[in-house]
Amino acid sequence: VSYILHRFTVSHQWLRCTLWVQFPPEVTGYVGHDVTLPCQFIQGQKDIKITQVQWSLKPPEGKEIIIIVSSSLHGVNVPETFLKGRVEIEEQSLMIRDVEKGDAGSYTCSIATFPSGSFEGTTNLVVQVIFKTGNLITIFCFGVSFYPVTR
């Protein structure tokens, strides 16, 4: 698995450090199985705190929807979407249980930190359906193109 590493240099009155958000450009999930979309915040200084992690989805057709938010102050919120009951955040990564073909799309991990601000990365989830009949295996893929997002 190859990963994209976005580098951010943050300058503040008394602080200058380099921060990284690491994520793969594409992940393949299989219908009926669980998949994890990795997102890792790598910090140079230990005094930077992650205050919130949010995952949103831009399906192949449709507008962006927020699917889960984890706040250090307020806990976890999962809005009413077709993914409710199947998603959770493990550290900053997103786990989707029992993948469905409609789960394909561009997932954005947004990490808010204090005092350095927000960072994000986008991973494309490609969903495959595998049918096996005797010695014949047929694979159907669902997904969209990957576009990195940096703010």
Image (cartoon, helix red, strand yellow):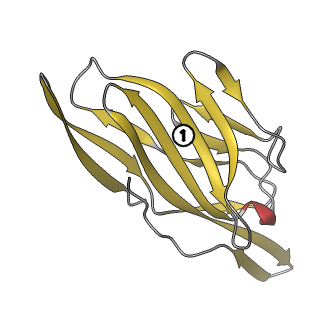
Q: Which residue is nearer to you in this view: 15 or 55?
A: 15
Answer with the quarter of the image where residue 14 lies.
top left
Name the residue at 60% across, 44% down. Answer: 55
Residue 65 rendering spot, x and y as whole percentages:
70, 53
- Could you tell whether 98 is left or right of 146 in the image? right
- Label 1, residues with CA under 10 Å away: few <14, some 14-19, many ≥20: some
Name the residue at 58% across, 24% down. Answer: 71
- 67 above or below 28? above
Identity, as a three-letter code, of the amino acid under mark 1? Ser
Disc 1 is placed on an element classified as: strand
Name the residue at 46% across, 63% down. Answer: 25
Answer with the quarter of the image where residue 99 lies.
bottom right
- 65 above or below 31? above
Residue 67 rendering spot, x and y as whole percentages:
70, 44
- Quadrant where the image shows the N terminus: bottom left
- 36 above or below 117? below
Question: How many badges with numbers are in the image?
Answer: 1
- Could you tell whether 55 is left or right of 136 in the image? left
Q: Residue at label 1?
A: 93
Residue 79 rendering spot, x and y as whole percentages:
78, 38
Extreme residue toward the right, this view: 133
Name the residue at 84% across, 51% down. Answer: 82
- Could you tell whether 23 is left or right of 29 in the image? left
Answer with the quarter of the image where residue 138 lies.
bottom right
